[in-house]
Image (spheres, rainbow, N blue to C red):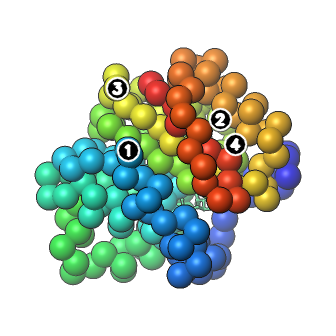
């Protein structure tokens, strides 16, 4: 899908489709992220939704690390807040509300994940510029997009936009039903 329909923001009522046994199996967070997320890192889960990946990354970065779980929708952040309340990872996850065309994050980031999010961003150039400005010099940015919403051509356009901003394309991880690319700052 291309154009305006693909840019619709995923509604909060759809969170069951984002965090369930099947998704954890096909998109196992540890398997997908073990190459990139290490102890002590500061990581960003941009468009975190109900936080399936924020929670797992908080376990992976350990006590010395931090996860910024950022989303446009307060409802998503509230779902994640409930999930982590009174758990040992609660303090490792900072919930951050973004604006539609501005993340507004000032922390410097080791690794950022945008899982099924970038196609919902209205101004990708602006988004990539801001992302590049907050990544550390050796920082990495993993973009994963859904095949059922984002055509091969649309994904390639997105990656071209990121390259124009200065990102360097790195490996292409295999992610079921998805298109994925790691960008280096
Ligand atoms: C399809 S959901 C994916 C959620 C999560 N990454 C996952 O894979 O389970 C997309 C999320 O991106 C968020 N989002 C969309 N546009 C955004 C923006 N411009 N800034 C921050 N979050 C955004 C939506 O609110 C939604 O929670």
Q: Mark 1 points at which residue?
A: 36
| Residue 103 image offset from top left, x and y in percent | 48, 43
Between label 3 and label 2, give the one nearer the viewer: 3
Q: Answer few, some or many: residues within 10 Å of disc 1's Cα (few below 14, many 20 plus, some between 14 and 19).
A: some
Residue 75 in view (yes/no) = no
- Please provide percent x and percent y for residue 61: 24, 54
Query: How far is mark 4 from mark 2, CA to CA?
Result: 6 Å
Nearer to us of marks 1 and 2 is 1
Mark 3 vs 1, N-terminal side: 1
Q: Is mark 4 on a helix, strand or loop?
A: loop
Residue denoted by label 2: 124
As drawn, is 41 to the left or to the right of 141?
Answer: left
* Disc 3 versus disc 4: nearer the observer: 3
Query: At which x and y percent is residue 8?
Result: 74, 57
Q: Identify the residue at image location x=21%, y=80%.
A: 86
Q: Residue at x 33, y 48 (%)?
A: 37
Q: Please name the residue that numbered disc 3 is placed on.
A: 138
Q: Name the residue under label 4.
A: 122
Q: Which of marks 1 and 2 is nearer the N terminus?
A: 1
């Amino acid at each position: 899908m291309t154009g305006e329909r693909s840019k619709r923001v995923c509604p909060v009522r759809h969170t069951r489709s984002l965090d369930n046994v099947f998704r954890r199996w096909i998109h196992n967070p540890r398997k997908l992220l073990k190459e990139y997320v290490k102890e002590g890192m500061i990581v960003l889960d941009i468009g975190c939704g109900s936080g399936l990946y924020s929670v797992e990354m908080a376990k992976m970065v350990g006590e010395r690390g931090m996860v910024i779980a950022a989303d446009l929708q307060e409802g998503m952040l509230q779902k994640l807040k409930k999930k982590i309340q009174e758990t040992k990872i609660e303090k490792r996850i900072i919930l951050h509300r973004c604006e539609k065309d501005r993340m507004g994050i000032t922390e410097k980031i080791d690794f950022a994940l945008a899982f099924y999010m970038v196609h919902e961003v209205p101004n990708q150039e602006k988004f990539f510029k801001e992302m590049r400005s907050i990544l550390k010099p050796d920082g990495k940015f993993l973009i994963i997009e859904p095949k059922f919403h984002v055509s091969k051509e649309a994904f390639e356009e997105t990656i071209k936009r990121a390259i124009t901003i200065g990102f360097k394309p790195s490996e292409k991880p295999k992610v079921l039903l998805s298109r994925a690319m790691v960008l280096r700052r």
